[in-house]
Amino acid sequence: MKWAEFTIITTEEASDAIAEMLAQIGADGIAVTDPWEIRRIIEDPDSLSYADGGFVDSLGEDVTVKAYFAELDGLIRLGPKAEEYIDEFDTTAIYGNITGSRVSVDEALRILKEQLGKISAFLDIGKGFDSWKYVQDQDWENEWKKDYKAFRISDRVVICPSWETFEASPSDVVVSLDPGSAFGTGTHETTSTCAVILDDVIKGGEKVLDLGTGSGILAIICKKLGAGEVDAVDIDKLAVDVAVDNCEINGCPDIQCYVGELKNVRSSDYDIIVANIIADVIASIACDIPSRLALGGKFICSGIINTKKEMVEKALADSGFKILRMEEKNDWMAYECELS
Ligand code: SAH
């Protein structure tokens, strides 16, 4: 399969807004190389990564954001991946009039530049659009694998790429992952803040729904921390296939992975529902979460860029939730909530 790779060179302050915008217009994959983030990881005393000074100096200051869009018959696919697989999902409310449209590269570039222009009205976006080219699956796979190493995502949990080994101590919970083309390497703030909350909340035996499972990472973390029944659900069939493989690799074949959205999940008595999706989706599904929770159940949500936090907090309050805990990391918010 061929992908159109759009490269944007930007500043650290604008990179999250640009990545969010790319997700909104339907990028199938987004790779952010942030030299400041790499410096922070290397300098963290708990870091499992080591690098010499020359490497750190060579990183420069610019953040590179690469977005990948599937190429189909010479056209670029915008809008949610779901459209390809399941017709009945109504995502127009979220993606507006660009839902599932196929456009020429020129039109995609026009939309991209228009959206960058909007962001540049309130943030310094640096150089902005740099270049585009077609890449094959293979290049994309190797690009991110180079930088993906074992790392500790929460007190107890270490994420280890499935092609690496990690010397675990007896108290470590190791999750082995090959995210493939699904979202969910664990390196994104929206995933790691969820993992930190789950590490505290899971005590053993809970029935969990991981909505928007991507690679299956959060579902597997829950299971390995001792959860009971776990459902891993995603609107993207490709993600569900990846999640099934990752559950196998981790010796968790009993996690139920299936394609769907909230209305399709099979139970209404989850002790924990975790959803790391974008802010607009969290805000729009919040009102339907209570009917899926067991008494005293918790809703953990993430993927929320802080410019949209008021909207999400209002939707949570309107749905009867009180926020028990809030995690903020580099402009991204995650919440642990309970019905009040
Ligand atoms: N849980 C993973 C992946 C998060 S990415 C992690 O924390 O890293 C968000 C995922 O949600 C994507 O795989 C996307 O396909 C899926 N998604 C988007 N909207 C959804 C919806 N309405 N219902 C279920 N899944 C959705």
Image (spheres, rainbow, N blue to C red):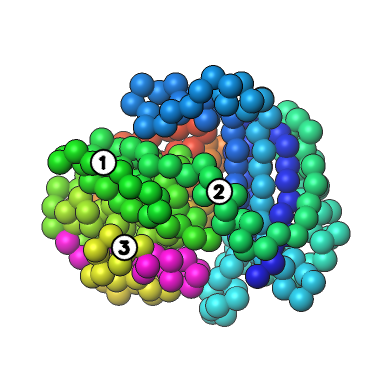
Identify which amino acid the numbered label 2 is placed on. Answer: Trp
Question: Which corner quadrant of the image does residue 91 belong to?
Answer: bottom right
Q: Position of residue 120 (x, y in %)?
A: 76, 35
> Residue at horizontal 52%, vertical 30%?
38
The reply to whether the residue tagged 1 has its Cβ within 8 angstroms of ligand 1 is: no
Q: Name the residue under label 3.
A: 249
In magenta segment, residue 231: yes
Q: Is residue 89 above or below residue 183?
A: below
Query: Could you tell me how far apart the alpha carbons at marks 1 and 2 are, in whole angstroms?
Result: 23 Å
Under circle 2, the secondary element is: helix
Label 1 or label 2, whichever comes before in sequence order: 2
Q: Judging from the image, what secondary structure is the residue with disc 3 in?
A: helix
When the figure is inspected, residue 133 is found, relative to residue 167, above or below; the finding is below
In this rendering, the answer to whether 207 lies above or below 165 is below
Within 10 Å of disc 3 (Cα), the crowding (few <14, some 14-19, many 20+) is some
Q: Which amino acid does label 3 sit on?
A: Ile
Q: Say whether residue 52 is left or right of residue 93.
A: left
Circle 1 residue: 167
Q: Residue at x 47, y 66 (%)?
A: 239
Which tag, 2 or 3, sits closer to the chain's start? 2
Q: Do the residues labelled 1 and 2 touch (CB within 8 Å)?
A: no
Q: What stretch is highlighted in magenta?
A: 228-245
Q: In which quarter of the image is residue 79?
A: bottom right
Would you name the residue on which mark 2 appears?
144
Tell me whether the residue at label 1 lies in contact with that at label 3, contact meaning CB atoms closer than 8 angstroms.
Answer: no
Crowd band around label 1 with a 10 angstrom C-alpha radius: few (<14), some (14–19), many (20+): few
In the rendering, at what x and y percent does residue 210 appear? 34, 59
Closer to us: 28 or 212: 28
